[in-house]
Amino acid sequence: MHFKADRAACDTLDVGKDYNKNNTGVIMNSNNLGRIVRKDNERLFYNIFKTYGMADIKESNYIDTIHLYNEPVPHIKFAPFEKSSFVSQCFSTRLGGVSSGMFKSMNLTFNKVGSYEADLRDNVMENFRRMGKVINTPVEDMVYSKQTHTNNVLYVDDSNRGMGIVKDRNYDNIDGLVTGTKELTLVTSFADCIPVVMADEKSRCIASVHAGWRGTVGNIVKNAINMMTDKFGSNSCDIIAFIGPGICVDCYEVSQDTINEFRKNYSQSECELIIQPENKPGKYLLNLPGADYINLINAGVRPENIYLSDVCTSENSDILFSHRASSGRRGIMCNFIKIIN
Ligand SMILES: [Zn+2]
């Protein structure tokens, strides 16, 4: 066991600076954009790590795993993909766009949000252009999922370029995308739900999935890995997986109905790792990223190849869109990933 005891509950960093472990404390940058609060993943995942191959887990897989940058617009890089010569990846924040009102400002959905009217199309398009510049991708080379909380994954290639952004989609109810096509950017969207982004350099394919509680309980992660295997001969032990910024267990209260679905699909010992009863009757805290972690392990991904975000969307709602923290008045963030070489 090599977890350090008495780690501070969270670290902070200012937006725009590459995170530096010595540089802790509340530091506002000159733009006053705010700061990111980091979670203590040693605490949140201790029992999960202990159960699933903790001997192989390095601290760098779950601490300081996301890095923020200001230019050309604020964005997040996931550590394992940051220095990759195989993929280019970024995740948007709510900053740096042109949208206003509840969509302020980097909103990346053309759709209505709940019962609210959709954002202006021109504004969303400009936001996509700005995010595209971060990884040097024109909007014509993006392909956007059509998320409806399913566990459906779609294989996409050159024929899908631009779909969901500059042209109509020829698919619906797709919460995960897989490709092996170079310079085709997979776009998936989030505002508390869990992003799971995967890359296998050996078989040359990538996947990006949206895992809310329905996608998680339906094991969309496994469906994506199966597609990587079927289409590209991928071996799960070669896959690098990143569980991105989403709602953490401390913030994710769910009711009995949701828990019942998890009890049907996860073993009793797995449920003990991801479900915490609350002091209120019929209410529980659910570790959604933890459930996706277990899905990855059960699909054969190696613990040392799984990285965890240490950032909760709900606790950083000044910088990130959070459905819960905003009571549904929010825009959407996207993950962008493409094969570059
Ligand atoms: Zn939280």
Image (cartoon, rainbow, N blue to C red):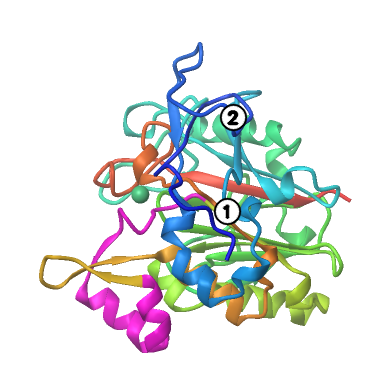
Read off the residue under disc 2.
Answer: 22
**Mark in the foreground, 2 or 1:** 2
Q: In the drawing, does residue 289 fall left or right of residue 83?
A: left
Q: Position of residue 30 (x, y in %)?
A: 51, 11
Determine the image quadrant of residue 240.
Answer: bottom right
Task: Please give the name of the residue rendered at 47% of the width and 45% of the height, measured from the top-left corner.
Answer: 311
Q: Earlier in the sequence, mark 2 or mark 1?
A: 2
Instruction: Evaluate whether residue 212 shows in this view.
Output: no
Return the residue nearer the eye: 123 or 239.
239
Return the residue nearer the eye: 126 or 287.
287
Q: Secondary structure at mark 1?
A: loop
Q: Position of residue 330 (x, y in %)?
A: 34, 40
| Residue 273 magenta | yes
Between marks 2 and 1, how big is the CA–CA gap?
Answer: 17 Å
The relative height of residue 332 versus residue 277 in the rendered view (above or below) is: above
Task: Please give the name of the residue rendered at 75% of the width and 75% of the height, measured from the top-left corner.
Answer: 237
Q: Position of residue 186 (x, y in %)?
A: 66, 54
For the record, the magenta segment spans 245-274
Q: Can you say which quadrant of the picture contains the N terminus? A: bottom right
Read off the residue under disc 1.
Answer: 62
Q: Check residue 284 in the rendering and tell me which mark sits there, or answer none.
A: none
Amino acid tagged 1: Tyr
Q: Position of residue 36 (x, y in %)?
A: 46, 34
Return the residue nearer the eye: 75 or 181.
75
Task: Please give the name of the residue rendered at 45% of the width and 18% of the height, measured from the top-left corner.
Answer: 28
